Each structure stands twice: as structure tokens, then as C-alpha cells.
Image: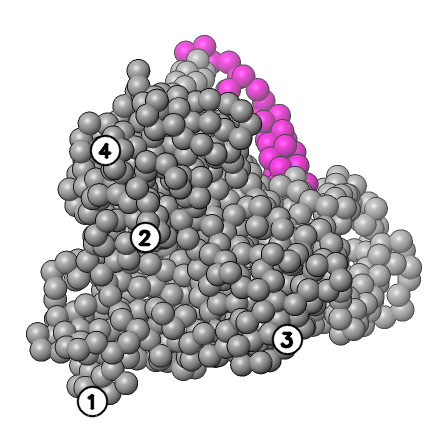
Amino acid sequence: MSHVVIIGNGIAGITAARHIRKFSDKKITVISAETEYFFSRTALMYVYMGHMKFEHTQPYENWFWEKNRIELKQAYIDEVDFKNKILFSAEGEEITYDQLILATGSVTNFRAWKGQEFKGVQGLVSKPDLELLEENSANLKHAVIVGGGLIGVELAEMLHTRNIEVTMLVRETHFWGSVLPAEEGKLISNHIQQHGINLLFETELDEIIPDENKHVKAITTLDGKQIDCQLVGIATGIKPNISFLKNTELETEIGILVNRNLETNIPDVYAIGDCAQQRKAIGNRKSVEAVWYTGRMMGETVAQTICGNTTAYNPGNWFNSAKFFDIEYQTYGWVFPKKKEGISDFYWEDKKNQRALHFQYKTNSKEFLGINAFGIRLRHEVIDNWLTEKILIENVIQQLPKANFDKEFSKKIKLNISDLQGQKDLAGV
Amino acid sequence: MSRVQYNMALSGQPPQELTVTQKVFVFVGMLGLLVLLLATFNFQFPNKALWLSLSLGAISVGTIGFSWSLYANKSSGIKNDGVWFKSLTSRGLWAWVFGILITLFYVVLYFFPQYLGLNADAENTGLIALFDPLSKMLSGNPASQWFVYGTLYTLSILIFGIKFIWKYRHSRYEIIRTISVMFFQTAFAFIIPEFMARLNGESLQLPYYDLKNIWPLNYYNFEQYRIDGFLNSGTIGLALLIFGVISIFVITPILTYKYGKRWYCSWVCGCGGLAETAGDPFRHLSDKRQVAWKVERWVVHSVVVFVTLMTTAVIYSYLDYDATKYWLNKDVFLGFVALLLTLVFCWAMLFRREELQKDAQYGAIGYFVIILGLIGIHFFFGNQLFLFQAETLRKTYAFLIGSVFSGVIGVGFYPIFGSRVWCRFGCPMAAILGFQQRLFSKFRISTNGGQCISCGNCSTYCEMGIDVRAYAQKGQNIVRSSCVGCGICAEVCPRGVLKLENDSPDGRINPKDVLLGNDVDLMNYVNQK
């Protein structure tokens, strides 16, 4: 019976383990240093806010693993002997494998700022980060968050529930400028400000200033402002957690390089989830995709390959979702943040109810390319079909009620084709 | 945790001290309660009508004002901050204090009403006397312990309903649903029965009848004194009796087919109404473990069997042997019951077996054999129906299920076991509606493709203890007997994954683990298994 070892018990690793168990009788071991059991990383914020206890973020009851013969091991692997297929743990244990799946996830990407080593400077990726934040929250009056993206807004929302004043440094002119077009970027920026968060646009961190106890007491920005604070939240991005694999024969770049079958350059070694990097990016996707859903898909795919049915990672239409304070966000297909040649926009906003839709389509052929929805829930299956069938933007607008997934009795959305025509000149503003 | 503070806020808020306004409203509300307490200890209020109004008014102003100060200045959205930090909502000291106080209240109410001022063959004293003016105004009769309870119950649903609407004001589903439970409680459970009592006289002897309270929740509806009352009240009485029968056998299945059991459990029912309003701050305390689900299925269906046996025995006991006097004699009635149970059993086993779990099948067969066996023994050996006296069965049921389970445990233990313990483990009505919902209904909670992030908010805030996430993360729709359709899972979901809806019954339960986002070929492999 061959032994599959998976390093990392996040969504990618655990999905792989579950599917390998479904299709085979292999011995499965999942190793994690972070926690004993699988939990939903995206739910850590709710633990801090008191919506849930940590155990509620664990999707399976503790008996599940033994019942499904998935062995869980809490250990920190710090060295891999790929030639002899042996893992060495920091605790001094040796674990042999026949097939190895690397699903080690991400760590905060500190960008070598001056003073980033001081106490009170932290990211928010792991459970230890959450525990550190809890510790750092004592006597915390003012926090500065560096980065206006998903982790940044999460941190802001979390700290806000404890009545901590929050200032966010945002590099672009609006929130999440690398992903959101200006219209909805402003909508969300306003919403965040309404909750009492200070947003400083076009502002970047210069230096972190400590007090006599080597604890952060202030930061300075590139434009020379000094802001007093007792916490600096680093939310400028994450990077693959692969430092223990550097200087081995495993090929890495930003992440662990894999082909479409999620195979690394070493036989019987695979990489999935946040830590994997496609040698050639798939379509418009990034070569490193650090998203819950892609981690899950890669887990499903690699399980097929390991169980003898070699399968390429072939994700369908792009989708993602998030929530910014009270506004839910869903996206399907591609909506580019910056104007692109040959692509037109159609933007609809309901200011009073803080709802918006942003469509993009090919200017000439009118083919529907993607949609951003704010405060409106859309039916994944329907939009996915529209994208696959490449239907026209007019048809999307006409049939939009079919794709509505809002709760019963919700306010209807009134869009019509003439709105689309009226916005022709506005496209890409 | 350093910033945790313990206060009596009944809802999720960031840890913070009470503001001055909130303290004032707490004080006003407490004054209202103090009047009730003083009355209980026989303090003589000079003008009872005035002091009762002042007391209930102060309680209302306190609660509504407190809710206003909690939510009015906040942007609309989910308000669960700090729920698990607060003593009252996380089984802390306040939770136990509060739980024990309500439990004691129920014990006194059900078993020692004399301490509330109910006097046999004498005028009311104490708390009950304080409610006399209101009762006389409505029905013309002095109050009873049940009138006091009914008034406080209705008041709770109204004032905590307002709080709930404030809390969920971003959701029209929640607002409309809450207005519905507030209306049905006030009109059907409280005012109409009191007015009906006022109409009673020579030609009309209607029993106290809350029209929305359907058998078997209303387990006493077919007892002899009520049947006599109905039959002695002319056409109206007969109409009410017929309504009582068709509401369970005709109206209920039709509405459940169209809308799921939510039409009753979270839109109409009084028990559900209290759970959704006053019980809302405790909804997350329900047990989500699989073992709790197993216990739930056995316990709640055993209650259905118990109530069926008990009602059959009670009706049987007052029917005649002689078929010439009235067509519905003892034997005809037993035959009816046996036939009906056989039909339901055969239908479920023949047409819906694949949707029943193994233990559900065994349970159904076991109970079916026992009931028919008991009826058979009676027919052939002619001894006591169901081995016990009908009266013994009735009393046991009324004590164990009607009082202890639904009241003392069901409400008294809100802060410990969550707000729907009775609905989930004990209510035979919920079990029958759940059976209908699981096996023939258009209702389901749809899961939105692959958008679930397994965060666990839906499962945590499910008052019925359904592990919603287990389905959502597989891309499966949720079709569970116990779901009362409160809609909170869809509210707390941060990614827009869940939607309560009524749609074609075909493909309602999608058995394949379809997760969108992946390419089709891979999903085919997954589904081949």
C-alpha cells in the first residue's frame, strides 16, 4: 500500500486527502505545523470578532479523520530528502513517503521595510497570526494597516469591532485598485469610510518607528507624514510558503513550479494551492493563484492524478467573492480594473442601497466577458453558462433576473438595454 | 481576552460598556419588572389597571429603547460582533442566572400557580389579580395564570420582534416574516380566543381555541370536553371542529408542499415566534454534532408516536361501542387510524425509500409494527387499548411533553441549549411538517455553485443545529426535515452562497457533488466515483 504524504492541512491539502480516500485505499498522512485539524482560514476574522469560536471554523468533526483513515500529524517539516523520499521534522522525526503533495500555503509578504521586525508589526494569514493579533490588541488605541486589499479590509473590520481606531494606507486612488475598476473602488472606499476607518489614498509606508521596548509607536509615510500607532498590519500581499524548500533540487521561482498536471520537476512530488506556480499562466489567471476555490480545485485534480487517472488542472471560468464590511462582492469571468483596448464597460449603481453591477464585453462582437456584483447575489451556475456560451451583453441584461440569487422579497434590480446604449460613450471612464 | 466585557446586551455587539442611554433603558425596563415582582408578593396596587399599564409600558419602553440604542445608529448588516464573548450569549454566568430564573418561572406557572395568586373558589390575588382588569376588558372573565402567561408571551414576541426587525433591517425576508409571527401571536393566539370567550353563553360553549395551534402541537384539541364544546356550539362549533381536522390533514400538507414547513414554524407558530424574537440572541447555542442529529430524529419521532397513541386512546375512550347510535364508533375509529397509518407508511416506504436514512427506515418499520400490533391485540383480545388507561397516557403526555419539554426545558433552557430545543427535539407538529418537507415539498435552501468558503457562519447560527456548511461546501442543496426556514444562514453567509426558495421538486436534492468552477471532465470523474 503506497503512502501519500501531504504537507499542509489547508483547503488544498485536505481536499486532496479526501478525494484520494474516495478513489483509493492508499495510506494518507497529512502533516501540519499550524493546527491539529483543518479549519477555514477565511473565517479567522469571525473568531476575533466573536461571531464564532475557533472550533466552529473546523468543517469536519474530529472523528471524521480517523473514520476516513486520514492520519493527521502535527509537525514542522524543515527538510526534505527528495532522493530517498524522506521528510525530516523539526521535532526530529523522519517520515517516508511514496508520493508527496506540497500544499504549504502562503505567508505574509514583508517587503523589507525599515523596522518591520519590531513588536506590533504583523500580517494576518495563519492561526498564530490571529493569536498574535489578540495579544497585540491589548492596550491598542490606533492601528495602521498597510495595503488596501482583502486582508487589509478584513483587519480593519476586525479591529473596528473592538473600538480600535484604524488608518489604512492605500497605494492607489481607491480601495483594491489592482482588482476593482474605479467606480466600484470608490463605492467600497466610501463604505469603508462610513464605518469610521481612515483611508489614506496614494500613501505608502516608509518606516516603522519603535519605542524604547522595541514596540512600534509610529510610522512614517513616503510623503513624510508621521502617524502614531501601536500596531502595524501588513496587508500588502502574501507569498508562497516555500523557504524550507530553497536550495533543494526542487525547482521554484515565486512558488513551486508545476506543469498542468501539478507535477513538479521531481517525480512523485506535486504542489497544489497557494504554494504552486504554473510554469505558464493559464489564460488571464495569475501563475500563483492564492484563492480558496483554486486550492480546492487543485486538490481535486491532483487526487485524480495520484489515483492513476492523470488529469490536468483545467479551471473553468474565473470566479471569486468577498465581503467588505456590509457589502458582498461576487465576480465571474473577467472585469479588468484598467481600460483595455476593444473592451467596453457597463456600470449600474444603486447609490441608496449601495448596490452595483459592472459588466465588461467585447466592443465589437458584444460578447459578455465578466461581471462584478456588489450587494447583489448572482447565481453561479447561470453566469458560468453564459460565459461558457459567450452570449451577448444584451442577452445578459435581458435575462439578468434569471441569474439573481438575492434573498426572497429583495428589492428588484431594474436594468434595461437603453441604459446600455446610453453608456456607450461612458465605456471605460 | 482583555477587551471582553460582560453586559446584559441580548445581541451581538462589540465588547463595550453600556452607554448612559442604555443604562437608562435598562433601569426603566427593570422598574416594569419590579412592579410584576411586587404584585407577585402581594403588594396591593391601588389602581390595578393603571399599574399594569405602567409596568407593561415600562418593560416595552426599556426593551425597545435599548434595541434602538443598539442598532439605530449602526449601518444595516450582520450584528453578531462579540456574541461569543458575552456572558449571556455564551453560556456564561448571566446565561445560567437567566436560564434558572425562566425555568423557575415555568415551574411555578405550570405546577404551582397558587404562588402567582390563583385561588381555588376565591378571587385572584397577587400577580394574576394585577392582570384582572385586562382580562375583563377582553373576555369579561377574571384572569388566570394562562392569561398572565399569554399576555407576557405576546408582549415578548412584540417587543423582541421590534428588536429583531431593527437588527435585520437589511433583509425584507426577515422583516416580513417577523411581522407575520407578531401578527399571528397577537391576533390568533391572544385577542381572538379572548373575544370568542366573550361570545360564549347558552348557545355557544366554544373551548379556548387558538386557530393556528394545530394538532398535534395542540395535543388536547380532540379531548372530550372540547369536542362537547364544539358540538354544543351550533354551526360555528362544528365549523371549528372541522377546521381543526382539516388543518392537519389538508391545509398543512398543501402549504408545506408549496412553501416548506417554514410557513408554519417561522411565520405562524407561537413557539417559533418566541424562539425567533426573544430567543434570537441564543440561536447559535444549538448542538451541531452529528450525534445530536441522531438523537433528534429518534426523540422527535417518538413524540409523534406518543401523541398519536395518546390521541387515539383519548378519542377512543369517549366513543361508543354501538354503531347504531353514531356511525363513528370505537371500532370504526380504530380502523380509520390503522388505515391512515398504513397508507402513510406504505407511501413513504414504496415511493420515498431512497430518501430515508437506514435508521429512519428501521424506526418507521418498528413503530408501525408496534402501533398496528397494539391495535390488533386490542381487537383480538379486547383488553385495554395500548396497555394503559387513556387518561394515564393523556396525563403523562401533558406533563412530560406539554409542560416539561415545551415550557420548562424548551424556553427555560434558551440560554444553554439555544432557542429551538423544543422545536427540534420535542415538537410533534414540527416532526410531521418535517416529514412532509423532506418527502414532498418545493422548498429547499439552494447552494450557489462553488462559492462556499466553509467559514461556518451558517452552521453556527442555525438554531435547528443543522450543519448547513456540510452541504454548502459540497455544492449540495439543503433539504432537511428540521429546517424551519428562518433564513438566518442566508443572512450570515458572507459569500452569497445560500438562498431559501420554492422551486420544482425535480432535482431538489442534487446527489452529485457538483462544484462549479472546475472543468466539466474532471467533475464527471468525481461523479463516477
- Choose between A337 and A77: the one closer to the eye: A77
Return the x and y of residue A186 as percentages of the image width and height: 41, 79
Callout 2 amino acid: Val
Q: Is B331 rendered above or below residue A190? A: above
* Dot 3 or dot 1, earlier in sequence: 3
**Element class at badge 4:** helix
**Quarter occupied by the C terminus of chain B:** top left
Return the x and y of residue B294 as percentages of the image width and height: 48, 29
Residue highlighted by disc 1: A425
Left or right for A218, reference A151 = right
Same chain assignment for discs 3 and 1: yes
- Choose between A26 and B125: the one closer to the eye: A26
Q: CA distance from mark 4 to mark 1?
A: 49 Å
Callout 4 amino acid: Gln
* Dot 4 or dot 3, earlier in sequence: 3
Q: Main secondary structure of the magenta part?
A: helix
Return the x and y of residue A39 as percentages of the image width and height: 48, 42
Image: magenta residue range:
B380-408
- Choose between A403 and A34: the one closer to the eye: A34
Furthest residue toward front: A247
**Element class at badge 2:** loop
Callout 3 amino acid: Ile
Give the label on residue A288, or none: 2
Tell me if residue B395 is in the magenta stretch.
yes
Same chain assignment for discs 4 and 1: yes
What residue sits 84% from the left and 57% below the top?
Answer: B37
Q: CA distance from mark 2 to mark 3?
A: 34 Å
